[in-house]
């Protein structure tokens, strides 16, 4: 019996890899009143999936959706990984994930706002919060990558915050159709 091949959707993106080699000269803008960021001492698999799926759904975030609960739980418990949740008047509004696996560099693995907070005007302050948190750990550098599937303001925001492009790569992702992601036609290859 031959194995059944999983149906995938080919997605073509250009990925930009960015780096910041020193902390910005001044702290970022303050978050508005009622907006806060909390580093979670422990993030459950269910909470992470809700954050990841809600923030990343419109932007074809798919890799973490392939992880089993056990695999994702191990990642979330890894001491190099920290999850930071944005709340707006007590309601989740986004998150970022920092990874110190390649210390003394910190990778901003995931960053984003939930659809109901996109366009709220505090995304840059939230990004600077992530950068300041990374350098507050004692990092010597920070890295992040973004791609053409992400929000169109992602790359300009990273550049404005002080990241510089290191390289670009064209990638074709074979996104499993079973994930049910809505893939914009312009990304389909």
Image (spheres, rainbow, N blue to C red):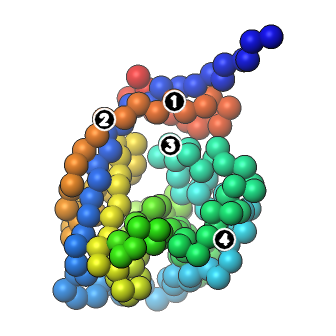
Name the residue furthest right.
1
Q: Which residue is mark 1?
A: 174
Where disc 1 sits, the SS reads strand
Q: Where is residue 22, by image quadrant? A: bottom left
Residue depicted at 65% across the width and 37% down the height: 179
140 relative to 27, above or below? above
Question: Marks 2 and 3, how far apart in space?
Answer: 16 Å
| Residues at circles 3 and 1 in contact by the CB criterion of under 8 Å | no
Name the residue furthest top.
1
Mark 1 surroundings: few (<14), some (14-19) or many (≥20) residues within 10 A? some
Disc nearer the start of the sequence (1/4): 4
Question: Marks 2 and 4, how far apart in space?
Answer: 32 Å
Disc nearer the start of the sequence (2/3): 3
Q: Where is residue 144, by image quadrant? A: bottom left
Q: Which residue is mark 3?
A: 60
Residue depicted at 33% across the width and 64% down the height: 143
86 relative to 71, above or below? below
Q: Which residue is more in the foreground, 152 or 132?
A: 132
Q: Which mark is residue 77?
A: 4
Q: Nearer the viewer, mark 3 or mark 1?
A: 1
The quadrant of the image that shows the N terminus is top right
Q: Is residue 94 visible?
A: yes
Where disc 2 sits, the SS reads strand
Mark 3 surroundings: few (<14), some (14-19) or many (≥20) residues within 10 A? some
Question: Marks 2 and 1, how far apart in space?
Answer: 13 Å
Q: Nearer the viewer, mark 2 or mark 3?
A: 2
Residue 145 image position (x, y, % from top left): 35, 55
Disc nearer the start of the sequence (3/4): 3
59 relative to 144, above or below? above
Residue depicted at 46% across the width and 89% down the height: 33
């Amino acid at each position: 019996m031959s194995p059944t091949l999983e149906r995938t959707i080919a997605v073509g993106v250009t990925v930009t890899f960015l780096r910041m080699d020193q902390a910005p000269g001044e702290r970022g803008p303050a978050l508005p009143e009622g907006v806060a960021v909390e580093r979670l001492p422990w993030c459950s698999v269910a909470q992470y999936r809700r954050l990841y799926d809600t923030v990343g759904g419109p932007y074809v975030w798919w890799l973490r959706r392939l992880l089993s609960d056990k695999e994702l739980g191990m990642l979330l418990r890894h001491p190099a990984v920290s999850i930071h949740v944005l709340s707006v008047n007590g309601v989740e509004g986004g998150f970022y994930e920092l990874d110190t696996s390649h210390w003394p560099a910190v990778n901003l693995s995931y960053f984003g706002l939930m659809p109901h907070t996109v366009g709220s005007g505090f995304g840059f302050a939230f990004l600077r919060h992530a950068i300041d948190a990374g350098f507050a750990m004692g990092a010597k550098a920070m890295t992040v990558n973004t791609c053409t599937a992400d929000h169109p303001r992602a790359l300009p925001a990273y550049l404005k915050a002080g990241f510089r492009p290191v390289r670009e790569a064209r990638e074709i992702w074979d996104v499993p159709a079973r994930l049910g992601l809505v893939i914009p036609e312009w990304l389909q290859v």
